[in-house]
Amino acid sequence: MRDIYQRLGGIEAKIDDFRTVRETANQADATANQALRLAESHDDALKDMRTETNNNRRWLIGTVIGGVFSTASIVVAIIALLSR
């Protein structure tokens, strides 16, 4: 009888250990899912930033080109006025 009780006690201890392992695994799974959602959110934010950066670069290039042509037009106009 004593041997049976000892074995049952050992089985109960192992079951408790399994429960602890299961809880730890569930917590790890929840943490991994949260990290995945956060990473996906950051990926979307980075895509938006890249798009915004590309748009800003286009505006900058357009503005610089416009400024160069405006400056060139002004210089040509001044030269034309001075050459009269």
Image (tube, rainbow, N blue to C red):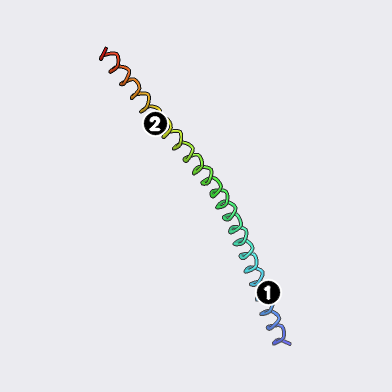
Kindly state the secondary structure of the residue where label 1 is placed: helix
Q: Position of residue 23 (x, y in %)?
A: 64, 64
Task: Name the residue located 58 percent from the left edge and 55 percent from the top edge.
Answer: 36
Among numbered discs 1 and 2, the one appearing first in the sequence: 1
Task: Name the residue located 66 percent from the left edge and 71 percent from the top edge.
Answer: 16
Amino acid, disc 2: Ile
Pick the front one: 19 or 38: 38
The reply to whether discs 1 and 2 touch (Cβ–Cβ < 8 Å) is no
Kindly state the secondary structure of the residue where label 2 is placed: helix
Pick the front one: 84 or 67: 84
Q: Position of residue 13 (x, y in %)?
A: 66, 75
Identify the image quadrant of residue 84: top left
Q: Which residue is mark 1?
A: 15
Kindly identify which numbered label has been placed on residue 65: 2
Vertical comparison of 16 with 55: above or below: below
Vertical comparison of 44 with 17: above or below: above
Task: Name the residue located 57 percent from the left edge and 55 percent from the top edge.
Answer: 35
Pick the front one: 59 or 12: 59
Q: What distance separates the C-alpha of mark 1 from that of mark 2? A: 74 Å
Q: Position of residue 48 (x, y in %)?
A: 53, 43
Vertical comparison of 51 with 72: above or below: below
55 on left or right of 3? left
Circle 1 packing at 10 Å, graded few (<14), some (14-19), many (20+), is few
Identify the image quadrant of residue 57: top left
Query: Which residue of the protein is positioned furthest toward the top in this rendering?
Result: 84
Amino acid, disc 1: Ile
55 on left or right of 64? right
